[in-house]
């Protein structure tokens, strides 16, 4: 049963609150329309109206309504709250409120709290060089970009994890609510611990329409909607209507009741420890689209319809009479009762705003870099795999990383500022050392036989890459640290979320008042080359192609070849700021190449010649055998081992690349190796057989401007694979040792003509391999047991 | 209230059904373990067990249970049904049932219905060159790849749209149910019309665990789960337990009741017309993970725990005693009561299977190419925009396409085999002519003011790219046609779904019994260059980079420069088979270049010189100005117009590319232009200034092997943009006419030294542009009003 919203406050309370709401609505409409006369101190004319009308009115008055009521609650209860505007184009509203609160003028002094400031505020909106129509990094108080929809609740939950005193007021638009990520993210409450986490107050804002069509949740009726939201674990209070005075009373009552309920849940958990999951409160606000805007234009209804979505009135040049309609609309907010002649909000209205960091627009949790503390890091060398000689040891790289992550969790247990996310693959990905010190988070039912599941767990497993990514974004944006471990192929599920986060990083990095946040770290494992058992659908190394399309300043890609280099890279990434770091590393047992000191040296440069694997000492090599990625490194070394034994006169140089961005020119990426250094490693004209983890073209792209790029012959994933053996995966894509060796011979005229027998032997090995696996179902012993001997 | 499952059948009915289930479970376990002795006709030994144990047991017995009960219902009711196995790794079960039904041996004659066939069936599973552990294109009866999770319900709904007699039995795993797309896809019932569509029977299979952790929906209790599913618009019947006889009775009752309810809903709508949306039936099956498998191993519980997820028994070489445990387990299914000595299923059990195409493994809807009818296509020339001279007309390309799509809907109204999907942008994308003949689909509440919304609508708008994509995939895979229109930036949301579909196309194209299906056609509009008003978050042209990573045989990318070329391309794509076609075209008014006959000629080659725009007649050009995409074409022509006026001695050749794949070598893509033809167009050594719609690197990548590739200078999107003017978007990324002209001059030594004044003039224009937009908020008249004059 939905509890009735119970009004507590006196009716007179809402006159001032209504004034704030009108002020916010007035300034919101002003941003869409005005470039002059912001106080309507003279009759409105065409000259005051922007030539190009952009922006979205429809959702804005509802956002302003919620914001005003939240301020009332913050003041009454001294809440520490942030505001997340899910509706895509609610920018004018959030900006209006932050200007009314004074924050906007604090961070953008050119936009003062006066008439001229207001004029500039209005003009800049959706204007070249100005601000866009949705909340974003430029918006004070925002940790959420309103462009791509679906992630508001995830950002809200991410922000309140481990922030017990924080409340995230999260407005979910009914358009956004149709998206997959949003539909799943309601379940975040099964991962929220009221004892140690803050609270999210979701406000589902039903205004009925998307751009043109009706929304699903607005058209299923209150009864079915209530069932759905209860099924998601919430107790919805419905606030529906359009008459302002009544709506203020209903909303204040619903908000008070919701905040009381949150407090009761938290008090219980904090006094007695977490016992059981309660139904969390939420609000459904059903208000007209374009509320308080023009009722109709030219006899066609606008308020409450899809026609209020963007700009309800336009075409002023051709329809001069509409200027009067706009003026009537704007004056309906009675600006003369809101602002003094200088454009200052009247003091009794301004007093409604919370003070200092209690203002949602100035809450430091929404500028997480302000609160960011360095992680306490263990010495990563402690987890080193002993490598007495290259190839002498076998280890699982991610298992070493798991031990390090375990100790990071332990060292930062008191600060509670580090989490590991992943879709149920923490153990599968060999990171299970984490479970020595923490568990999988769950506040749903836990059964005795469950494997390390607890309401306090710091490992967040949910079979949704969207949820993992969204929670982590919210956690990082509010000033904490984390890691997302994922199957490589399925990280494409969050391609678009990565896009938005990378764009946020780029833009926020250019905003002086925004402080850098911790990097978003991906550990992609169970990668393409070891999806031999799962088959073709699990094979895709293309996320790194996607990543490098984003601005070089914010993206980094690492392909550590073994455990010690993974440890070094992981340490670096977890200390870094304001990047997206992609680390690709396998979880299977593999030969280890570098002892810890060698790994550190190698990773700090990012690429380098491996002299122990090369036989070109003192001479220019005939061929460079380059590799990036653990399996390509293995196959390259196996090829080199073979060549050095069978064709010792071929002078081979082995180069390994950990930091993919070193391949680019310094002008293209800050990690780019200078051309002279690059040429000295890759030579100016010798063939380079490059074994690459991903799609071959990425190497061509990155090395395009290098002297020797025409001699790069790249072997990589060619979209060939099936259910087969690990080694056969490389054979199908010609990345295996035999193809690599054959290619090397073929590129060096000096040996090519004399090595016919060796080429034949290589082809024979490939045939033997094919015959063997078809009979035995696993790789030949000579492959499985191969060890570096040269 | 959940209706009690009401048993109708006699207990004795289930003895045979149970035998089928045991047979399927036996063969499922056999696939995971056995490479010999498939009938246990001799004692099991290590030699009979696969050396490498792969596969997933956990979900399989539940799938087999459902499949057996579906067969009972199909026979009793003569249902036309398909089976969709959402749980990722249910492959052994689906394969086992299709072998028991005989379909497997019909499509793979080498795997007969006898002991040797059974041995081969078992051996091939998760074996090199064999089949993978999840259902996929190789699996008879499947339209669903069980690799990436989240899309089972979408495929099910897509298949039954416009298939009134079809029932899709869709098993949703509780792991998959955590994904965003699945969470949203329950709402598909608001888009299903019982009068003209078939029905989906969702079976939520709760076995409690993902790989290692518990699942959300298994841990919220029946009461909350029931609220949730009712809120989604379903009436769940819960079948819970593990004792087979009881479970058979419960399941049969729940299934009968569900099918009765479906029939009642359909009858009402088909007699009286669609009146109101009913709550659709569904089943929740709560059964132990690894049901009927080993209860425990070495004293640790397995059945009913996460340890049953993959291979419950392993390590036979080191633990020989386990061979006996495996044998006990396999013999618990009493194979001697199921198969004769030749390995044939006993006739009374085999008789349980439906006959011919009523077998779910042989249903033609699951091999949609069998049922595919060509679309009735209007003559696309009918929608031609009149272009008396290049640049003389202005038009919106997608508006012309909208008229053509309208007539395709109308022409195929009787066949009901064409739908248009999109996230609420049909009108915004100027395709609203569609609404002259159809509406937006909705069976939720419709209000009087709604704009073309109807239960019969053929335009499916939902603010979820996942739902659009998933429905369309299901619709295409079951033999129909469609188009997905989307904002370019946000199509990345379905990157991973595209991956899976492209992989399906590649693999199914190599399977003789699979018939080609209609292509998946994307119309990407509201593209990067016209997201000036929405800003940076809406700007991303990278989907085509993602697409070209997939196999050349299945992907096509088109960038028509104007309306007539869009019409020609669209006609081609809608007639094509078994591709993914990506069309990128703007919706804004733009100058038109080609009359219809010129457009057809141009598109049929895919790229070509535009002689009317070039001034190199009879001579080798100094520079080639190439372009791909509508905005790059506009800017290139504006640059050429300027150059021809200001620097007539510069001989310019204009090349336009519609079919991006022509740029690749013929060895890389079937559309690749032969090298000689390519060289004759792009020259062997002249500078090529290439204005490209997307990220510049894609052009370098595609032309990498061409003679002249070193002279390509590509201008494209460089991840620079904000809220600004349309032209400024090109300036920020140096794709504008002034930068292009300047680059052309700079690359031609013969004119470079004499054109300093022109270069200065170009810089002045850029400065004037910047000053103008900062003041006026829109582009300079000289830009907006520019027309081709040369």
Image (cartoon, coloured by chain):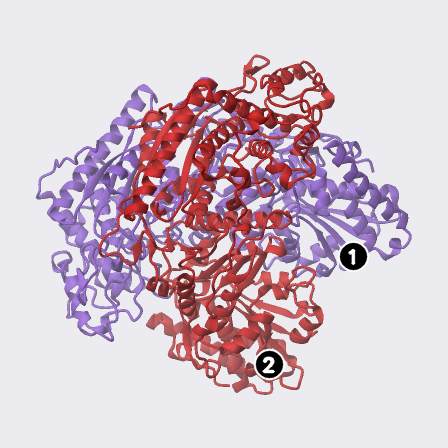
Chain colours: A purple, B red
Q: Residues within 10 Å of mark 2 (few under 14, many from 20)?
A: many
Is residue B348 at least partly visible in the picture? yes
Q: Are marks 1 and 2 on the same chain?
A: no
- Measured as percent of width and height from the top left, residue B457 is found at 35, 55
Closer to the camera, A93 or A149? A149
Chain identifier of the residue bearing label 1 in the image:
A
Q: Residues within 10 Å of mark 1 (few under 14, many from 20)?
A: some
Q: Is residue B735 left or right of residue B393?
A: right
- Measured as percent of width and height from the top left, residue B525 is found at 44, 62
Mark 1 sits on what residue? A686
- Distance (Cα) linking label 1 and label 2: 37 Å
Q: Is residue B223 above or below residue A483?
A: above
Chain identifier of the residue bearing label 2 in the image:
B
Mark 2 sits on what residue? B652
- Measured as percent of width and height from the top left, residue B463 is found at 37, 51
Closer to the camera, A487 or A337? A487
The quarter of the rendered structure image containing the N terminus of chain A is top left
Q: Is residue A650 left or right of residue A86?
A: right
């Amino acid at each position: 049963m939905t509890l009735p919203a119970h009004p507590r406050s006196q009716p007179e309370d809402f006159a001032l609150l209504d004034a704030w709401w009108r002020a916010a609505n007035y300034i919101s409409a002003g941003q869409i329309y005005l470039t002059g006369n912001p106080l309507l101190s003279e009759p409105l004319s065409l000259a005051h109206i922007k030539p190009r009308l952009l922006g979205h009115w429809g959702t804005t008055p509802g956002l302003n309504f919620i914001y005003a009521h939240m301020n009332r609650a913050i003041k009454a209860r001294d809440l520490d709250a942030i505001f997340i505007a899910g509706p895509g184009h609610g920018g004018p509203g959030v900006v209006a409120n932050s200007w009314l609160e004074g924050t906007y003028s604090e961070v953008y002094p050119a936009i003062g709290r006066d008439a001229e400031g207001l004029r500039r505020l209005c003009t800049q909106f959706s204007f070249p060089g100005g601000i866009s129509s949705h909340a974003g990094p430029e918006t004070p108080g925002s940790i959420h970009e309103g462009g791509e929809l679906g992630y508001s609740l995830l950002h809200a939950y991410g922000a309140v994890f481990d922030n017990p005193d924080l409340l995230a007021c999260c407005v979910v638009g009914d358009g956004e609510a149709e998206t997959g990520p949003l539909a799943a993210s309601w379940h975040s409450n099964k991962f929220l611990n009221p004892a140690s986490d803050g609270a999210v107050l979701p406000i589902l804002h039903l205004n009925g329409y998307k751009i043109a069509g009706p929304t699903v949740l607005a058209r299923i009726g209150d009864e079915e909607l209530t069932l759905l939201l209860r099924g998601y674990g919430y107790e919805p209070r419905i606030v529906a209507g359009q008459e302002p005075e009544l709506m203020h009373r209903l909303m204040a009552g619903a908000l008070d009741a919701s905040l009381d309920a949150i407090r009761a849940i938290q008090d219980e958990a904090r006094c007695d420890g977490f016992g059981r999951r309660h139904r969390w409160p939420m609000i459904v606000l059903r208000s007209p689209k374009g509320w308080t805007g023009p009722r109709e234009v030219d006899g066609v209804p606008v308020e409450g319809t899809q026609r209020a979505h963007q700009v309800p009135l336009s075409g002023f040049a051709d329809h001069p009479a509409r200027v009067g309609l706009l003026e009537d609309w704007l004056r309906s907010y009675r600006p003369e009762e809101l602002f003094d002649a200088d454009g200052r909000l009247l003091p009794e209205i301004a007093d409604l705003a919370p003070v200092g960091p209690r203002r949602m627009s100035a809450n430091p949790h929404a500028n997480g870099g302000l609160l960011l503390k360095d992680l306490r890091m263990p010495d990563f060398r402690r987890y080193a795999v002993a490598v007495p000689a290259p190839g002498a040891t076998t280890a699982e790289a991610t298992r070493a990383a798991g031990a390090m992550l375990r100790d990071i969790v332990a060292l930062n247990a008191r600060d509670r500022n580090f989490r590991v996310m992943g879709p149920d693959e923490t153990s599968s990905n060999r990171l299970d050392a984490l479970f020595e010190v923490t568990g999988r988070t769950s506040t749903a039912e836990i059964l005795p036989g469950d494997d390390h599941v607890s309401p306090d767990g710091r490992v967040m497993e949910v079979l949704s890459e969207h949820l993992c990514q969204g929670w982590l974004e919210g956690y990082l944006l509010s000033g904490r640290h984390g890691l997302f471990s994922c199957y490589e192929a399925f990280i494409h599920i969050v391609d678009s979320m990565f896009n938005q986060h990378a764009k946020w990083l780029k833009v926020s990095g250019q905003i002086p008042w925004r402080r850098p946040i911790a990097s978003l770290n991906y550990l992609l494992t169970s990668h393409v080359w070891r999806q031999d058992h799962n088959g073709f659908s699990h094979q895709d190394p293309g996320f790194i192609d996607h990543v490098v399309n984003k601005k070089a300043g914010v993206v980094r890609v690492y392909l550590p070849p073994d455990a010690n280099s993974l440890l070094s890279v992981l340490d670096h990434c977890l200390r870094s700021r304001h990047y997206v770091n992609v680390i690709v590393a396998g979880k299977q047992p593999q030969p280890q190449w570098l002892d810890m000191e060698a790994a550190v040296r190698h990773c700090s440069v990012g690429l380098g010649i491996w002299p122990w694997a090369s036989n070109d000492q003192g001479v220019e090599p005939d061929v460079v055998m380059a590799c990036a990625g653990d399996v390509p490194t293995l196959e390259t070394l196996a090829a080199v081992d073979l060549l050095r034994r069978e064709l010792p006169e071929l002078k081979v140089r082995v180069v390994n690349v950990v930091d993919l961005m070193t391949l680019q020119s310094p002008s293209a990426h800050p990690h780019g190796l200078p051309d002279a250094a690059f040429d000295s490693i890759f030579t100016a004209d010798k063939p380079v057989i490059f074994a690459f983890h991903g799609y071959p073209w990425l190497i061509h792209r990155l090395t395009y401007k290098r002297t020797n790029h025409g001699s790069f012959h790249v072997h990589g994933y060619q979209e060939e694979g099936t259910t087969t053996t690990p080694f056969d995966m490389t054979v199908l894509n010609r990345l295996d040792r035999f193809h690599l060796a054959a290619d090397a011979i073929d590129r060096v005229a000096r040996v090519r003509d004399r090595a016919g027998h060796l080429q034949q032997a290589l082809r024979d090995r490939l045939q033997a391999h094919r015959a063997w696996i078809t009979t035995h179902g696993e790789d030949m012993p000579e492959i499985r047991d191969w060890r570096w001997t040269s």
